[in-house]
Amino acid sequence: MSKLDHPNICKYYETYESPKNVYLVMEYCGTKDLFDKITNQVDGCHFTERKAAVLMRKLLLAINHCHSNGVIHRDLKPENIMYNQQGTSNGKKDMWSDDIKIIDFGFAVELEGREKDGYCRSLIGTTSYMAPEILNRQPYQGHVVDLFALGVILFILYAQHPPFTQASTSDSFYKLLATNRADVFWKMHSQRHE
């Protein structure tokens, strides 16, 4: 994390060690995460397409910064994104100033030093955000699995529910996507909320 300096990534300051513990001094990022924000939407309201796009832009820029500095997160999910809704000087809410910070780099890995082919092999992350190659225990490119997780997050931001339980052909929703049946996938999701 010491390599990363981006407004949408929790800042790491320093480390203190004792005989039994390691203490990380990090930026305070608030008390609510994006999962809290999604689950507490009132009366079925959800993020508008525009607001979801604004948040995704910030997340994409932050992850691009990570990848450009050789860091792969590998556990992106709403619970690892702190969310603070900001107001303006006149007291109105302004979606452009909402503050998000990516946290929890416990599963992160540096690309440098990866095996010769540049692939990761660890079964790491949260199942519902894992790319299919991780679930299938295949070698995977870290930056690709981060982008896959961001796609799942985008779907949840707008729909308020995940696109599938896991990216495996045993999951009926995912199987529709994997077999090029996106039309049926969207029809089933549309019926789910009528």
Image (cartoon, rainbow, N blue to C red):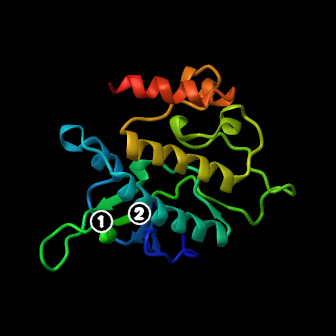
| Location of residue 147 in the rendering, given as x and y in whole percent from the top left corner | 60, 52
| Location of residue 176 in the rendering, given as x and y in whole percent from the top left corner | 61, 25
Residue at 40% across, 64% down? 101
Q: Is residue 166 left or right of residue 55?
A: right
Q: Quadrant of the N terminus?
A: bottom right
Q: Is residue 173 left or right of residue 86?
A: right
The foreground one among 141 and 53 is 53
| Location of residue 89 in the rendering, given as x and y in whole percent from the top left corner | 16, 80
Q: Are marks 1 and 2 in contact (CB under 8 Å)?
A: yes
What is the secondary structure assignment of the residue under circle 2? helix
Q: Is residue 193 left or right of residue 153?
A: left
In the figure, residue 55 lies in which quadrant?
A: bottom left
Report crowding for label 1: few under 14, some 14 to 19, many 20 or more residues within 10 A (C-alpha).
some
Residue type of the residue flagged with mark 2: Val
Does residue 28 show up? no
The foreground one among 81 and 187 is 187
- Which of marks 2 and 1 precedes in the sequence? 2
Residue type of the residue flagged with mark 1: Met
Which disc is residue 54 wearing? Answer: 2
Which disc is residue 95 wearing? Answer: 1
Report crowding for label 2: few under 14, some 14 to 19, many 20 or more residues within 10 A (C-alpha).
some
What is the secondary structure assignment of the residue under circle 1? helix
